[in-house]
Amino acid sequence: MFSDFIELIGAFVLVLAILQITSDRLYFSIKVYAIQSFFVSISILSIGIYSSSFDLYVSSFLTLVIKTFIIPYALFKTIDEMKIKREIKAFVNITNSLLVISAIIIFTFLLTRYINIGGSVIAKEIFPISLSIIFIGAFIMVSRQKPITQLIGFLTLENGIMLVATSVTYGMPLIVEIGIFFDVIVGATMASLIIHHINHDIDDMDATSLSDFKE
Amino acid sequence: MLIYIFLMVLPMLFFLKPKATFIVQTFSSLVLLFFSAVLLLKHEYISISMFHSSLPYLDFSIKLDSLSLLFVMIISTISLGVSTYSLNYVYDEDYHHKRLFAFIYTAFIASLLFVVTSFNAISFLIFWEIMSTLSFFLVIYNYENEENRQGGFLYIFMTHLGTAFIMVAFILMYLKTGSFSFENWVHVGLDDSTKFWVFLCVLIGFGTKAGMFPLHVWLPKAHPVAPSNVSALMSGVMIKTAIYMMIRFYFYFLSDIPWWYGFIVLLLGSLSALFGVMYALAQHDLKRLLAYHSIENIGIILMGLGSAMLFNSNHMPLLASFGLLAAIFHTYNHAIFKSLLFLGSGATFLKTHTKDMEKYGGLIKLMPYTALFFIIGSISISALPPFNGFVSEWLTYQSLLLNNKIDINIIHIFVPLFASMLALTGAFAAACFVKVIGISFLGSPRSDGAKNANEVGKFMVWGMGFLAALCVVFGLFPHIVIALVAPITSLLLGVDVSSSTSSHLFMISTPNFSFGHLSTLGLSMGFAVGIFMLYILIKKFGNTKTRMCSTWGCGQLNNDASNQYTASGFSQPIRKIFAFFYHPKEKIYPTSRKKKYFFPILEYKAHSHDGVESVYNLVLKVFVKSSAYLINLIENGSIHIYLLYILIASIAFLVYAVKGGIN
């Protein structure tokens, strides 16, 4: 019964990740990301209540604060400064992206049928779900041109990792999770700074132009 | 023992004073030479484990057994001569950054010494790389010249290719023995396939360094462009370290080798010898000519080695020791006379400012000592009695002929062929050095540089004189070297070669006495008596009227130096006969366009191609082009593509892991 609940939450996260693919508006993408992080934090919290472990409360709280509020806020500010609202030229357009990620999802579900996870498993179906989320995040990074969208793809990927780490087993050691949070914050900050600078210096918010720096 | 190490690194400390460096290097080489000889003759071998580091596998250990000691002797002999020579040479040639030069030079010698004394695979590789890198820096020392840079890059490329194969051989040995120490590799029993791969990797890896036939391309490019004292060291000693390791592997580490291993070495050796000498004949750049002769002599050494391996695989230790004696003797001799010749070429280069033989001439009158020593070296390298080259080539020849005692048909068919190839090589070498001596030292000067040459400084003369004296001494008293080699054969094969070959005073003989024996001392005494008699006879009965005419003048009194026989002209018949081999390009063209019809000034240019080199060029061109295309395709600079690689890789790993889980 409980595992069904967790799997439901996981399904929401996956749907939001798919929604992320379809969005070509940056504001909307960030909002989707915030909601997705909110669901991840609910999932962690419920497992924390279920297993009454203090570590998971902390990590749920951190997810809520950092990923639902701080990072989206920072990204909003970056977008405001950049005055760019839309992802225009994706390498793979939205229709094809949907086809590709549906293939990815089928593939991961097929693949994970062969994997036996040892130990006590809370929700088995979370595993293919979060694997799909990870691959969707990676796919966003590959197929989108704007660095800010790539950053969102990275954050989605990271949400997937968080989900699989907490929901399949009883979470990672707290110190590791705090380390990951720290990484994400630093990564987001760095990325928004760099994006800001690229924008400022090159007047073109496009990661493909970075290849001009190649030797 | 610590004295040894101290002596090896001592000269490096003086690099701030280049002159002092060379003096200290000279003395430390002298002491090393003396100590090594004493230790070798007293059969006292030392081993020491210097340093165990905390890193896994990395410990430095040094052992001086008889083989190492002999190579230490070779290195210190040459370093003694060359360092004395450098005292003048480096200053007269006026190299920039003399301190740097002195430091690299001494560090190079120290690394050579450490290479032949290291007794652990890892430390050996470290010193081997230090040696290669330092010699690379010495090759490109005059880096302003395009030619130097090209030669240097080819050299460093080839030497690293070789090192890769050496590493493979070492790793194979490690996998079989579980140790990197050479102590545990002695006569290790390997299965056939591993043995073959070790044999092949050692042959390719060290063959590259030695300049063996198909892998020699770097040698004629890198050796001529280095400073002459360095080319003497490289050609004389550095390529011998490869021979040292080959002997170690084929006689000390591997046991029960099949006979055709030796046959392959013999075949490659004879090809190198013939190939090297034929290309040497076509050169008119003196140092490049000498570099090709290095290939030839490495070939002769490999022939001795190969025949020893043949005997060894057929369990004839006595004859094997005889072949090994021939190989090691020739190694020592080649080190001596080749560095002598390189030093001589350096001296002529210093005074005439050109390496082109066509511009020399008449140097014997202007540089009498250099010419004398150069002629001694030339006689040695052309394997003419009574000097040392003759003795070792005679030994090689005998050992090849004795190969007929092995009862294998292929050997019966091929060995006479190899022996005749060796004979042909000797003949070509003699022709080549007749050319060198005749063109550069006799006749009249062909250029202003040659006209204004004078004798070189006294240290240079001493350095060359020392090596020339050794040529004579080893030629007349070969027992010295046989006594030094005897401990090696008893170590590697369990047979003392000196008892069977030098039972007679002043005479060396093949193990079964009836087959052949040789006394260079008696030969030269007979020769001297004969010459004296002839002289008396001519004085008494002959026409002793003196005529004055210039050499190569065909009896005409001709004052124009350009009318003399030239180096290209001398080798022209051979170029024509072996045109299929040389692919010569000859061209006559007017130097100025204006006087095309009325008394044109014509210039003749002959150039022969190294066939192997063009094959290399082709392969390299295709390889570089395709790899550049691939790199461009893979690393196209787009972040998205890089991310895609990560994605694909992670999916592939996932699939792989799941697949492993199913099975």
Image (cartoon, grey):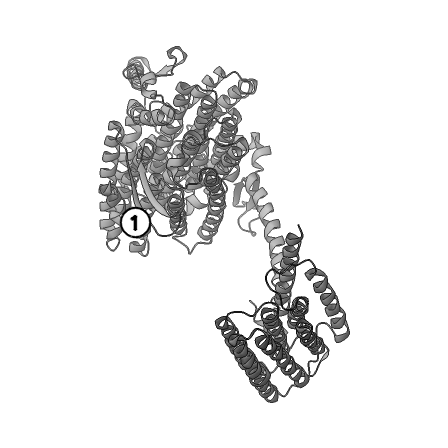
Q: Which residue is mark 1?
A: B90
Q: Tell me: residue B651, above or below residue B89.
A: below
Q: Residue at x 74, y 74 (%)?
A: A93
In the image, taking residue A40 as reference, residue B399 lies left or right, namely: left
Image coords of residue B249 (percent x, y): 43, 33
Tell me the amino acid under the disc marked 1: Val
In the image, taking residue B338 as reference, residue A109 lies left or right, namely: right
Q: Residue at x 58, y 87 (%)?
A: A73
* Snapshot quadrant of residue B316: top left
Q: Nearer the viewer, residue B579 or A155?
A: A155
* Snapshot quadrant of residue B362: top left
**Callout 1: SS:** helix
Quadrant where the N terminus of chain B is found in the figure: top left
Q: How many marks?
A: 1
Q: Nearer the viewer, residue A77 or B207?
A: A77
Image coords of residue A37 (percent x, y): 62, 79
Q: Tell me: residue B88, above or below residue B416.
A: below
Image coords of residue B246 (percent x, y): 43, 34
